[in-house]
């Protein structure tokens, strides 16, 4: 683990024992070239991360690019078995922690990519996708996005939710509209997550989550992963103190067993800035989307843990937030 400053002995001991799970990060998409070098994954190892969930697509990324990206990452992981393993099961994750490997799982940002084809869900699960969010900012055939006129969960959407439960893919309501999210949460027999979302009470942004949805998520047994995106934390503010305020708010409202970390670190920020400017319908500039958004890097997780200690959190609570809460959801939902 490479960290930017000396940690307290107590914090270092807790980190040593903790399973550290970053529930969302963004690799460059598509990953192209015959033999791409995925040095980004080493950044998670440097940050002491044990499980990294990374997206294979978002917004309007094509079905082909989802599969190409998944194939490239799977190939890299399988070619470097001393350092990496696919996060296909809870047991694989536990074994990886013991062996000092990084477990890599996939997520999909928005059911738009499945179009009207329900059968793609089990195929995505088979290649390593462990959570999918309902809608990415805009409406799709499943339900409404958080930056759109939310249409609610559709009849097809209800079938998609049931199919995700059947195959073991975790349902996520980040980026999703309020009405759709509430309908997903209220009908779910299994834990539902907000993979990478922050409390709206601390920063009034439609991408952030109001208290009643946070409580409904906790009621399913789910977890909300606090992200490290400056414009969702505050005024493009990624200070550790600000991230801790968001964590502490969620802990007090939902209970510590319902809070996790999903940093949403974007590795290729040059491409991100181009995409943000090209697609104002998906990322409206008036909501703060544009060049210069700051992201908290995975190397800062140790400092977050130190900060949680200074808030007076117990070791059990810190370990839960750092990863064991998301592991519990995986245990309940994955097949
Ligand atoms: Zn996202």
Image (cartoon, helix red, strand yellow):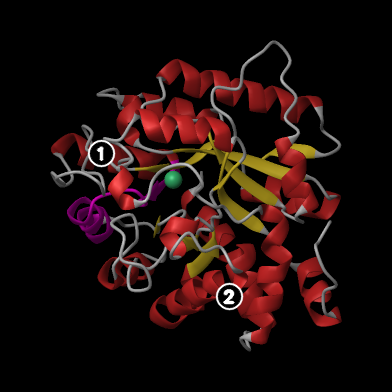
How many marks the image carries: the answer is 2
Local crowd at mark 1 within 10 Å, few (<14), some, or many (≥20)?
Answer: many
Give the image location of residue 245, x and y in percent: 50, 77
- Left or right: residue 314 versus residue 126 is right
Q: Which residue is mark 1?
A: 138
Along the line of sight, the residue nearer the viewer: 193 or 203 = 203
Q: Quadrant of residue 221?
A: bottom left
Q: Are marks 1 and 2 in contact (CB under 8 Å)?
A: no
Which residue is at 86% across, 37% downward? Answer: 82
Range of the magenta residues?
168-187
Image quarter in which the N terminus is found: bottom right
Which residue is at 77% across, 68% downward? Answer: 15
Give the image location of residue 152, x and y in percent: 15, 47
* Label of residue 241 in the image: 2
- Left or right: residue 3 versus residue 154 is right
Whichever of callouts 1 and 2 sits on the residue coming sooner in the sequence is: 1
């Amino acid at each position: 683990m490479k960290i930017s400053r000396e940690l307290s002995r107590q914090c270092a001991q807790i980190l040593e024992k903790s399973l550290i799970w970053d529930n969302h990060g963004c690799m460059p998409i598509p990953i192209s070239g015959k033999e791409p070098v995925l040095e980004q994954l080493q950044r998670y190892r440097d940050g002491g991360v044990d499980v990294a969930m990374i997206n294979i697509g978002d917004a309007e990324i094509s079905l082909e690019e989802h599969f190409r990206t998944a194939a490239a990452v799977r190939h890299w992981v399988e070619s470097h078995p001393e350092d990496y393993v696919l996060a296909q099961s809870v047991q694989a994750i536990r074994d990886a922690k013991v062996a000092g490997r990084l477990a890599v799982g996939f997520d999909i940002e928005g059911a738009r990519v499945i179009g009207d084809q329900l059968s793609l869900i089990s195929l995505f699960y088979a290649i390593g996708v462990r959570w999918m969010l309902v809608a990415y900012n805009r409406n799709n055939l499943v339900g409404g996005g958080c930056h759109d006129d939310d249409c609610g969960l559709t009849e097809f959407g209800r079938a998609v939710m049931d199919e995700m439960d059947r195959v073991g893919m975790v349902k996520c309501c980040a980026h999703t509209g309020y009405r759709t999210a509430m309908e997903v949460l209220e009908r779910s027999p299994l834990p539902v997550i907000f993979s990478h979302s922050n409390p709206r009470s601390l920063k009034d942004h439609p991408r952030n989550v109001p208290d009643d949805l946070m409580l409904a998520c906790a009621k399913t047994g789910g977890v909300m992963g606090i992200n490290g995106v400056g414009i969702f934390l505050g005024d493009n503010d990624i200070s550790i103190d600000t991230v801790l305020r968001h964590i502490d708010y969620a802990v007090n409202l939902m209970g510590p067993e319902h809070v996790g970390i999903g940093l949403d670190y974007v590795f290729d920020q040059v491409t991100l800035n181009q995409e943000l400017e090209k697609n104002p319908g998906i990322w409206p500039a008036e909501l703060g989307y544009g060049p210069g958004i700051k992201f908290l890097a995975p190397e800062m997780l140790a400092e977050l843990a130190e900060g949680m200690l200074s808030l007076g959190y117990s070791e059990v609570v810190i370990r839960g937030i750092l990863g064991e809460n998301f592991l519990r959801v995986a245990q309940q939902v994955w097949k």
